Structures are given as structure tokens and as C-alpha cells.
Image: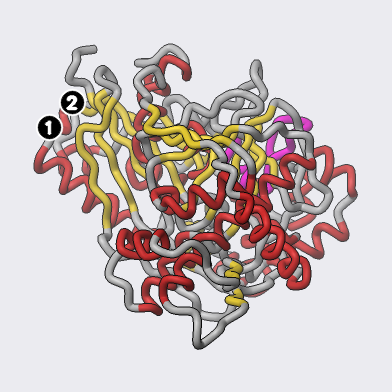
Amino acid sequence: MSRSDFFLGIDLGSSSVKTSLFDSISGKSVDSCTYPSSEMEIISKEDGWAEQDPNYWWDCILKTFENLSEKNDFKLVRSIGISYQMHGLVVLDKNNDLLYNSIIWCDSRAVKIGQRAESELESSILENKILNSPGNFTASKLRWLKENRSDVYDQISKIMLPGDYIVYKLTNKISTTPMGLSEGILWDFHSDKLSEDVLEYYNIDRKLIPEIVDSVGNQGTISDDVRDRFGFDNDVKVTYRAGDQPNNAFSLNVLEPGEIAATAGTSAVIYSVTDKNISDTNNRINTFLHCLNSKSKKRNGLLLCINGSGIAYSWVKSILGEKSYKEMDIKSENINSSEGLKFYPFGNGSERLFSNKKIDSHLIGFDFNKHNNQHIIRSVLEGISFSLCYSIELLREFGVNVDTVKVGNANLFLSKVFRESFINSSNLKLQMFDTNGAEGAARGAALGLGFYKSPHEAFKSLNIISEEKPNGKNDYIERYKDWKDFLNKLN
């Protein structure tokens, strides 16, 4: 391959789509596009519901393709990688047409169904086979359709995760991955196959599950329509597909057991790679397959998620009428503390961190004579960082040695107050890298095509931006303890 070979990475989030054009020789993204400029709508028809239109996802991806192809030669693109929002449900009929909006990751309508399954399934299935409670993950969402919208369910030909749908739109080929099935609680870790126990319990027909392909490797050639519209060369394939959190870890070169990644986008997540099948009986930590899992090398991901992270910061920006996140960050830096104001970012559906309970968001300790926008902004940044610290504590309880966490140069980690609060309250080292999910998906595409011979080779060009350590500001530890004391009352 020549020096001008490119790989395309798509990162489908719940706020926007980002697509990056990656030069595998220089090891850098040469161009990128995010669409839309405002955040994508989350449709909430009832309390606790969260849906999005998959056709709009596809429209956003096409917009990024249009933007990039106007400035770059897509004939130089060799393959495509996809990162996508996890745990969602997409359903197609026999003509491969959408039957329903996607029920996305933060939707809570299937919580009771998952709780019922947890009480009725044998503990050996939960702890040794699927390693999780069915919760409100994809399998439970599908069961909700069966129980509440039989008119939709009876027409389903195939079910998908959000990333599976994007692969279908690119290739006209319907498939899923073991990793995707694991995040839907449809994978048997003990037998390394589709979970017959969950299918039988939920009375889901095996025929609804698409063909299963590997996350890294050939997943289909792009359609003639897509190729001709944007000027791709012949035989361009999709060669990588991963949920956004495994992909974030992959993007940061978090590949081996004990390595840890974090992100603070719409949701905030701590993700640790392990070579063990770990089950948390309290369902606060979830175990899913990592995108690099193989028969010869077991790789799972331990995931702790807080639903309300960037979405909480966005909400505060709107409510306070602030102009930009940058200005908000500066305001938070211009005061030394939130003056006792405490924020709890749990207003985006049921939280896995609290066994799928919905405890809502809270802003505690208002003093009308003392607090202003600056204090509110700072309390939100500290509250989200404290929720990540709470997740770190749980990992340590499971014996994971957490001393270094890797993050990308994006989202809330751009905030000095957020980083400082997280590092000092958790007592860890933070390494920030010049990458993002779309670039990681592009590296994955290059790996899946065989351009890179190993995952480690794919990250030789990854640059570290900064490394920060605790600075001895013990007041963060005290504020975290105070924050946690009230959290225990909420929970």
C-alpha cells in the first residue's frame, strides 16, 4: 500500500456522528466532520423512555461523507470502521424496513422486565454464563416489544444493535457480532456462543438473530450506491465494528488486562480490560466482550456507566443560558470551590451503578445569597467527576489495581476543574491522548484489513498530550466524602 492510503472511521454517538479520515502511514487523522452541529434529539414519549430514529443516524453519516468527499479523494479509502452507541435495539421487517424507532441505551422502559428475569433465571446462568442481569439491555427491550407492541414484534424479521444497522446501510448485509450480542445480554461466556438460556426465557426466536461475524475483519463490501455516490474505489469493505466504550478503550491503546480507559461524553464510563469472566452479583459492574476478544486470547471489558455526564453539562448550559462550554470551564476555574453546593448527575434514566434504580438528579445546598452560575457550573463538573470516582472505588473493591487511567482529549476531560477533581478524589494518574472514537474506529479498520499486523503496531503513532498526577489538594477528598454521604441517602 502507498503512503496515500486512507481509512474511514465513523463514531455514532447519541449526540452526534463524527467521521474521521485517517492516514495510516503518518498515523494521523487528516480530516474529520461532526454532524449535526447541535445535539441529536432523544425522543422521550413517556417518562424514562429514550428513542432515536435510525434513518436520522444514517442521514447524519451521509452528511459527514458529503463534507469529507468534497475535500478529499475517497478513492484512496481502503476500508471503513464503525463505533456505535451500545445496548440499543433496532428492528427490521422482512423487507428490511424499520418497524420502530431505536430504543437506545438510556431507555428505562424494560427495567422491570430485566428485574423479573433476574429473579426467575437460575443464579448459575446469571453468574457463570451471561455474567450480568438482563437489566434494561437489548434482550429486555425486545421482550418489552413482545409484551407491549405485539403489532410491531410480530413483523420483526431481524434485530440489530445500532452499529449493525449502519453496517447494513453501508453494505446491504445484515449481521451482528459476538461483542454486540454480549452487550445485549444475548451471549453465553461459558460456551462462547449465543445464549440459548436468554432466548428460551424471553421466548425469542433464534431466526431473529442475524449472521454472527467477528468485530475485526471483513464484514461486507460497501454497496454500489454508496460507492458511486461518494467516489469510493471498488471493493471497499467494512472491517471493524465495536460499541463506543470498547472502541474508546481500543482508541486509547487499552488492550491488555489491567489497563483502564475513561470517557465523559453523553455518559461517563470507566472501562477496564480483563482476561477473566467476572460477574458482579449487584450488577453495578457489567462484563461484555472486548472488541479484541478471540478464541486464543480472552479479552473482556468491565464497564461502569453513569448515564448523566455530558448530557447534564449540556442541560446546565441551556438552563443557565451560557454561550459556550469553554466559557463555562473558565468560570468554574475562577472560583476555588462550589461553596457546599452538591450536584448528582443521575437524571438520564435508570442507573446500572445503582442496580438499575432511577434515583434522579439533584442539586443540593442552594444559598440564594451566596451561589451564582459559577458555583452551579463547578458543582456539576465536580459531581460528575465524583460519580466516576465512585466507579473507581467499585473497581478497586473487585481487586483491580487502578493507578493510571487513559482518556482522549475531548468532552469533559477538556475541563481543568473536572480533571483536577477526578484525579485528586480518586488518587490516580491521568494520561491524555490525542485521539477520539472516530480515529480509533479508523485504526480498527486498518487492523481489520490487515494493514497493521497487530493491535500494538496500530498504535505506534499514538501521541500522549499530557500526564497529570494528584497535587495534594485534600479538600477534593473531603468534598467527595461529603458528596458520597448524601449519595448513600439517595440510594
Q: Quadrant of residue 113?
A: bottom right
Q: Nearer the viewer, residue 408 or 84?
A: 408
Labels 2 and 1 touching (C-beta < 8 A) = yes
* Identity of the residue furthest to the left in this view: 70
Is residue 192 located in the magenta-colored stretch of the structure?
yes
**Residue plotted at (27% across, 51% down):** 34
Crowd rating for badge 2 (residues with CA inside 10 Å; few <14, some 14–19, many 20+): some
Q: Quadrant of residue 141?
A: bottom right
SS under mark 2: helix
Horizontal and vertical percent position of residue 88: 54, 56
Q: Is residue 171 left or right of residue 214?
A: left
Residue 112 is at least partly visible in this image: no
SS under mark 1: loop
Q: Which residue was labeled with disc 1?
A: 73
- Residue type at mark 2? Leu
Q: Please provide the residue range marked out in magenta.
A: 177-194
Q: Is residue 94 left or right of residue 148?
A: left
Q: Is residue 444 above or below residue 284?
A: above
- Residue type at mark 1? Asp
Q: Is residue 245 above or below residue 220?
A: below
Q: Is residue 250 left or right of residue 330?
A: right
**Residue plotted at (38% across, 69% down):** 41
Q: Which residue was labeled with disc 2?
A: 76
